[in-house]
Amino acid sequence: MQIIIENDAGSKFDFDYEELITSVITGALDYVKCPYEAVVEVNLTTDEDIHSINKEYRKIDKATDVLSFPMLEFNTPGDFDFLDEDMAIDCFDPDTGELVLGDIIISVERMEAQAREYGHSVRRELGFLVAHSMFHLFGYDHMEDGEREEMERLQGDLLNILKITRDESFDTSLKSENEELINIATLAKDKAYAPYSNFRVGAALLAKSGRIYTGCNIENISYGATICAERTAAVKAVSEGEREFVKLAIMSDLDDFTYPCGICRQFLSEFAKDLTVILGNKNGEVLEIPFETLMPDTFTFRKC
Ligand code: THU
């Protein structure tokens, strides 16, 4: 068995990530009863890197959480019988005779942001991403509904067997809260519906309850009916019962910081007694601004 793990992002974790990756990979191989010793390569990389790999190999011009590059073409997912045939010789490493399954690439930023968003540990998120990717290496996919359900069932079952559950909470000491919120806003940006401006904005709103609400801009052909990322997050929060906002992180595709527009400032002011706005840019710089400096002397009225 060869499990090659690279940490190109140079990330530090408060758990033994190599041990976790190894146990998920060996657990997955046992789970599908792989009859061969296998080779799997895992790379923990940056968002920027995974973005360029996604663009180069899948022609998708955006970052993602995990990319799987299977080496085998299964006739039936998880069924290794086809490897008995003579022509399958190419699937094995000529030196070691081990089965070359493929590569897994994970964005550490996205992994951490997703853990934060789902409220579970980075360990659990890493376990999930590796398990998910292993099933791709075994020929499973989730393009169609039936396939997706089957893959979800298998990866859930594997994680249960390995006792990698969702009950561990996110460890905020790993990253500052601001960085985490910026990561979540960056992730939310990918959901933007912006066919008219092609300008994507993501927001992550931390409300007083401790919950985080994400938002993206949602454009409309009428232009005027467009809703900004900040207001999307705000309406999600208020409609869940929140009335006080603590932090709001905003990210866009610009190299520069993106400030909230005037309509959003007015909209937010209602819930922004102690709000801090966190702006991030592509260089990883973070600005922290008290909301009141962006919106002094807010409009108010008193009925006579
Ligand atoms: N936009 C936001 O989402 N937030 C802002 O604060 C400013 C603008 C969006 C709206 C529109 O979809 C696009 O950016 C271009 O204006």
Image (cartoon, rainbow, N blue to C red):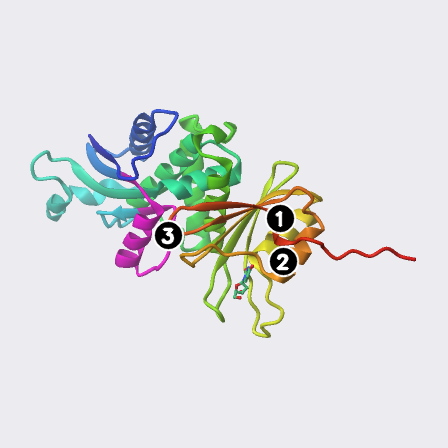
For marks 3 and 2, give the CA distance. Answer: 27 Å
Which region is colored magenta? 43-67
Nearer the observer, 152 or 238: 238
SS assignment at label 1: helix
Ligand 1 located in image quadrant:
bottom right
Marks 3 and 2, the one that precedes in the sequence: 3
Nearer the observer, 100 or 62: 62
Would residue 165 be seen by someone viewing this image from the given angle? no
Q: Give the residue type that dot 3 points to.
A: Ala
Instruction: Identify the residue shown where x is 49% and y is 51%.
Output: 188
Tell me the residue that label 3 is attached to: 63
Tell me the residue that label 1 is attached to: 291
Marks 3 and 1, the one that precedes in the sequence: 3
Tell me the residue that label 2 is attached to: 264
Would residue 298 be seen by someone viewing this image from the given angle? yes
Say whether mark 3 is within 8 Å of ligand 1. no
Q: Residue furthest left?
A: 95
Report if residue 209 lies within the magenta region: no
Q: Position of residue 122 (x, y in %)?
A: 43, 33
Marks 2 and 1, the one that precedes in the sequence: 2
Q: Give the residue type that dot 1 points to.
A: Phe
SS assignment at label 3: loop
Q: Position of residue 200 (x, y in %)?
A: 47, 60
Crowd tier of the residue under label 2, counting other residues whose Cα lies within 10 Å: few below 14, some 14–19, many 20 or above: some
Say whether mark 2 is within 8 Å of ligand 1. yes
